[in-house]
Image (spheres, helix red, strand yellow):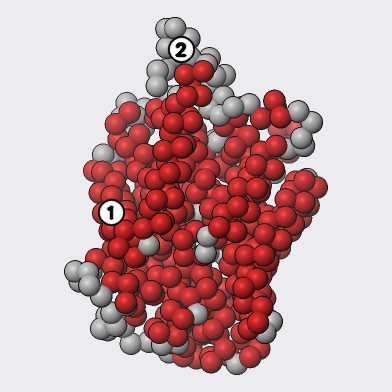
Amino acid sequence: MKNTTDKNSKLSLLGSISLGTGVMIGAGIFVLMGQIAELVGDLFPIAFIAGAVVVGFSSYSYVKFSNAFPSSGGVVKFLNKSYGPGTTTGFYSLLMYVSMVVSESLVAGTFGAYTLRLFPESYAGYASTLGVGLIVVAYIVNILGNKVIGATATFTAIIKVVGIAILAIAGLAISGFADITGNYIPKNTETLPQGFGFVAALALSILAYKGFTTITNQGADIKNPHKNLGRSIVFSILICTLIYVALALAVAGGLSIPEIIEAKDYALAAAAKPVFGEWGSWITIGIAIIATVSGVIASIFSSSRLLAMLSNMKQVPSLTKLGSLKNPALIFTSSLAILLTVLFDLTRIASIGAIFYLIMDIAIHWGLFRHLKNKVVFQPIIPLIAIVLDIAVLAAFLYIKYLNDPLVLIVAAIGIVLLLVAERLFMISHTDDEGNMPMGMETTNNKT
C-alpha cells in the first residue's frame, strides 16, 4: 500500500510541465525586457526567439543527463557524473550556486523597482532597500518550513503564469504587431559591427529561460523520470518561448524603444499604462510583486538546498561546524543575496549572473561530450553546437561589457578566481597521499 501511495503521489508529465513552466516564467522577465532592448533596439522580440534557439541546443545535454540519471541532485549530479568528485565538479557547482543567488538578487531588485511605481518619484532611491526587505522576509518564510513554502508555491505560480500570458495576449490584441525594422541603433552598440550587440544580448535572453535547469531536480518526484523529465524540459521551453515573444511584441507595440530603455527596470508596467490605462499598470505591478515575492522565496529555498547538498557531498566545507546556527546554508545564501542587492544595480546583477551561468553551461556540455560517450546515448554534434553558441554569446557579451561597464568583468573575474582557489585549497585539505578523496559520494577515487 505504501508503494502505491508513493507512486500515485508523484508528478505526472502535465504536472511536471506546469511546475517547470512556473519556475521558468520567473520575475526576471519583468526587468530583462528593457535591458535587452538597450542592446538591440526594436529587435528585442527577435532576441527572445534566438535565445530560445540557443537554449534549445543547450537543453539537449540536460535532457540526456536527466533521462540517464534522474535525480534530485540535478546539475550537481550531472557534473559529478562527468568529472567525478573534486575541484572541477565543486567549482562549476559553485558557479551554478552563485548564479542562482545572483538571480535572487535580480528578482529582489525587480521587486523594489516595480513596487516603487506605487509611490511618488521622491522614493526612487529605495529599490534596493525594498529588495533587501524581501530577502529578509523570504528567509523568515524558509525558516518556517516546507509546508509554508508549498502552500503558496502552486497558487502564486498560477497567478504568475496566467497573469503574464493574459498581459501578453491582451496587449498584443490591443496594440497590434509592432514594426520591427532593426533600424534603431542603441547607444551601447552604435560603434560595434552590425549584429554584434544582438549576439551579446542573447546572454540576457538566455537568463529568461535558465529556470529550465531546476526542472532537472524533479528526478525523484516525477513518474517515469527517464522519459518524462526530458519531455517536461522541452515543453516548458516551448511554452515560455510563446509567452515571452508575445509579451515582447506587446511591449514593443505599447512603447517606443527610447521609452522602453528609459523604463528598463519596470518596462512591463510602463508598457501596460498606454495600452490598458492606469488600472493595467497597477495590475502589472501587482503580478510583478507576486512573481518576485514567490520567486525569491522559492529561489532561496533551492539555492540553500544546493549549498547544503554540496556540503554533505564534501565539495565545500561542512556547514554543521557552524555550531548552533539553524540552517546555516540558508543564512549564508540570504546574506550573499543581500550583499549583491545592495552593491549592484539590476543591469550589473543580470550581467554577472549571465557570465557565471554560461561558463557553467559550457562545462555541462563538455562533460557530456568528453566523459560520458559510453554511458549516455546522444548525438555528439549537438553538445558541440551548444558549446560554440555559448562561447560566441559569452565572448560578445564580455566584449560589450569591457567597452561599456568593465566593473562587471572585474567583479566576475574576482568571483571566479576566488571560487576556484577556495575550492582547490579545500580539495587539497582532504585528499590523501594517493590522491583519493573520501567525500561520501558514488565515486570516491577520482583525482582533481
Name which residue type carries label 1. Ala
Question: What residue is pinned by disc 1?
Answer: 395
Question: Local crowd at mark 1 within 10 Å, few (<14), some, or many (≥20)?
Answer: some
Say which mark, if any, is on residue 422. Answer: none
Question: Local crowd at mark 2 within 10 Å, few (<14), some, or many (≥20)?
Answer: some
Left or right: where 96 falls relative to 72 = left
Q: Given this view, does label 2 or label 1 mark the residue nearer the observer?
A: 1
User: How far across and down, in percent of the image, does residue 333 sit?
Assistant: 63, 45
Placement of 71 over or under 21, stated as above or below: above
User: How far across and down, in percent of the image, does residue 204 sit?
Assistant: 41, 62
User: How far across and down, in percent of the image, does residue 245 sit?
Assistant: 42, 73
Placement of 444 over or under 394, stated as above or below: above
Can residue 60 be seen?
Answer: yes
> Residue sitting at 32 percent across and 77 percent down?
186
Q: Earlier in the sequence, mark 2 or mark 1?
A: 1
Q: Quadrant of the C terminus?
A: top left
